Image (cartoon, helix red, strand yellow):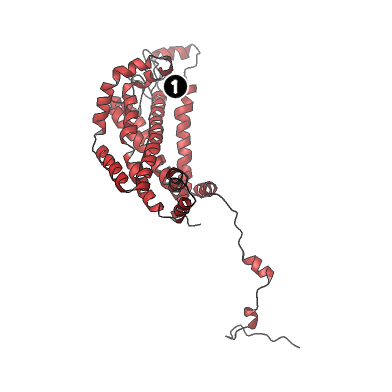
Amino acid sequence: MEEIKKNPLSMQVSMEDFMPASGEDKESLVIMRESVGFWKDGIRRFRKNKIAMSAFFLVLLIMIFCFIVPAFYPYKYEQQMKGSERLAPMQYSKVEKAEMEKGEKVFPHLLGTDQNGRDYMIRVLVGGRVSMTVGLVASVLILMIGSVFGAIAGYFGGIIDMVMMRIVDIIYTVPDVLIIILLAQTLKFPLEKLSMLPAFTWMQKLGSNMISMFIVFALLYWVGMARIVRSQIMILKQSEYVTAARALGAGPGRIIFKHLIVNCIGTLIVTTTLQIPSSIFTESFLSFLGLGVQAPMPSLGSLASAALNGFQTYPEKLFAPAFLIFIIILSFNLLGDGLRDAFDPKLKQQ
């Protein structure tokens, strides 16, 4: 019996289209996807973000230059060289030229020297290290204090939330610069005595102003983080898994730290990452006003402040720390946006 050829232009329905699917057809429609965890899936999504990956590698590059390169740099940030005051980039002093004529190798001053004959490149690198250390330490303090405070206020609510939020409102009204000045003057002599002890000699390099700055970050700057976490906790505590945890006998502490804060990880990551450049900018601003690290240790803000006097003659002395501040803040902002897109479950599209 000859097979009837169907006209391709015909609107006639073929009964074969309504036959039950075979096992092979069913398997071809099943798309198997590897089961991945929260962190593995977030890292996979982060790697696909080219802008965030570029910012991540830029941050790593800056850290290498600021934390590792100074250990191998031929000059020290406090080293003063007579006759080498205010040299232009890649310029040698008369003493160095004489040494070069004798056949000795002299490493060039890539960014010149300052008014005291100190190599400016190493001072910019060390200044970036100081600023980034302050930003990282301050962000960790803000994360720890703000997340715990906001989670407790958001979970319990009621009178506890009202009292804790009124404390936040009061702290918001405190002028941070004034507190840093007062703490620096009040704690100056106790900190100097404490720095004389063998276990606290590292405080002599930072100085009382920098220690006061860390204390102010721990006392004042966590309030923004606390408000963000509180709003997230108030939404998440209505979820079914929180009700199930309560039914299984989980206490408030376990629910807050094991369930609620963990599910705020996307918000915490992006807020903490964006807090780093904010802390760096605050430290640079205070150092610009003379409230930062103790001399001779440099900071990007103190370098910019010292470069203002000779800006018309030596503009590169101001552009170098200002450009590094710009790159650090930009890279951390882009990195924070990429981490938010990767680890926030609400933004998942694949």
Q: Position of residue 283 (x, y in %)?
A: 33, 31
Q: Residues within 10 Å of mark 1 (few under 14, many from 20)?
A: some
Task: Point out residue 320 in the picture as x, y percentages from the top left corner.
Answer: 36, 30
Question: Where 76 falls versus 47 (above or below)?
Answer: above
- Find residue 162 and report its image quarter: top left
* Residue labelled with disc 1: 108
Residue 160 vs residue 215, the one in the foreground = 160
Q: Nearer the viewer, residue 264 or 108?
A: 264
Q: The residue tagged with tag 1: helix, strand or loop?
A: loop
Task: Between residue 226 and residue 2, name the one nearer to us.
Answer: 226
Q: In the rendered image, which quarter is residue 123 located in?
A: top left
Q: Image point 45% across, 37% down: which residue? A: 59
Judging depth in this view, the residue of 231 and 343 nearest the camera is 231
Apparent side of residue 201 relative to residue 29 in the rendered image (left or right)? left
Q: Name the residue: 39% across, 13% down.
A: 94
Quarter of the figure with the N terminus: bottom right
- Taking 24 as reference, is 34 left or right? left
Q: Quadrant of residue 336?
A: top left
Q: Position of residue 244 (x, y in %)?
A: 48, 54
* x, y percent for residue 262: 46, 46
| Relative to 326, residue 247 above or below | below
Q: Residue at x 62, y 66 (%)?
A: 29
Residue type pointed to by label 1 = Pro
Q: Residue reaching furthest right?
A: 1
> Is residue 224 visible in this depiction of the protein?
yes
